[in-house]
């Protein structure tokens, strides 16, 4: 089957997700339309495609132990000059995101990995674009606000066209999840 690139994230629901994606594209970030708006729990990770069932079983266990929590975004931040990123800040729900990402990457699981930087939950709104556009993103979204109840997370796969597609959703607290439950057609983008 070969290797595939996967990621695990919390989707930013509508109408917030589409709005932030459109703004990201408007700032000149060419990757915006291929990346659903999200908070990362597992960054892009290459795995053997044959290991996807084990990854899904692991994520189902993590989700079964999770509980819904409030998420709130407010204002902007940046990782510059260390990394060319402007983001919307997660001001409520960050501790729960941290708890989840540790369990997703747990050494006993199939996607154990070290991170390049310490984990900092956020929603990217500009990445790798010119400095003036990064400054504009930082300023224009400085008073951005959104909130919603987070009820789970999802597994995504990056296609050969560089577009991320949802493979499966993992709702919190569902202890017995049949292997095919929550599957999404691979040709569809998240619509939440």
Image: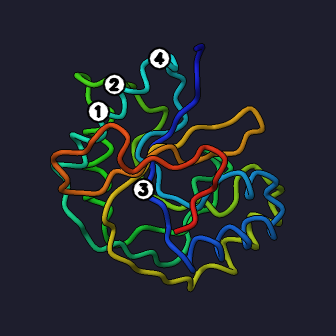
Q: CA distance from mark 1 to mark 4?
A: 13 Å
Q: Which mark is residue 57?
A: 1
Quick check: 65 above or below 162?
below
Q: Mark 2 near mark 1, Cβ–Cβ under 8 Å?
A: yes
Front residue (pair 112, 14): 14
Q: Which mark is residue 50?
A: 4
Of the two numbered discs 1 and 4 on the same chain, state the one appearing first in sequence.
Answer: 4
Judging from the image, what secondary structure is the residue with disc 3 in? loop
Q: CA distance from mark 4 to mark 3?
A: 29 Å
Of the two numbered discs 3 and 2 on the same chain, state the one appearing first in sequence.
Answer: 2
Of the two numbered discs 1 and 3 on the same chain, state the one appearing first in sequence.
Answer: 1
Q: What residue is at 26 percent from the left and 58 percent from the top?
A: 96
Res 80 visible: yes
User: What percent of the width, then of the height, locates residue 42?
Assistant: 44, 40
Res 112 visible: no
Front residue (pair 20, 170): 170
Which residue was labeled with disc 3? Answer: 121
Of circles 3 and 2, which is in front?
2
Mark 1 crowdedness (10 Å alpha carbons): few <14, some 14-19, many ≥20: some
Residue 5 location, quadrant = top right
Q: CA distance from mark 2 to mark 1?
A: 5 Å
Quick check: 131 above or below 149?
above
Front residue (pair 27, 105): 105
Of circles 4 and 3, which is in front?
4
Judging from the image, what secondary structure is the residue with disc 4 in? helix
């Amino acid at each position: 089957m070969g290797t595939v690139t996967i990621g695990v994230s919390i989707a930013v629901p509508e109408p917030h997700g589409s709005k932030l994606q459109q703004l990201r594209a408007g700032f000149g970030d060419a990757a915006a339309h291929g990346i659903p708006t999200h908070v990362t729990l597992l960054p892009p990770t290459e795995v053997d495609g044959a290991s996807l069932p084990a990854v899904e079983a692991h994520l189902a266990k993590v989700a079964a132990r999770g509980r819904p929590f409030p998420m709130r975004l407010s204002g902007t931040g940046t990782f510059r000059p260390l990394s060319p990123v402007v983001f919307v800040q997660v001001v409520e729900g960050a501790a729960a995101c941290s708890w989840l990402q540790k369990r997703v990457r747990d050494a006993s699981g199939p996607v154990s990995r070290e991170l390049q930087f310490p984990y900092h939950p956020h929603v990217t709104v500009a990445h790798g674009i010119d400095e003036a556009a990064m400054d504009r993103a930082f300023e224009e979204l400085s008073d951005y606000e959104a909130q919603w109840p987070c009820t789970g997370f999802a597994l995504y796969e990056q296609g050969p066209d560089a577009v991320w597609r949802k493979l499966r959703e993992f709702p919190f607290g569902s202890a017995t999840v049949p292997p095919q439950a929550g599957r999404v057609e691979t040709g569809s983008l998240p619509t939440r």
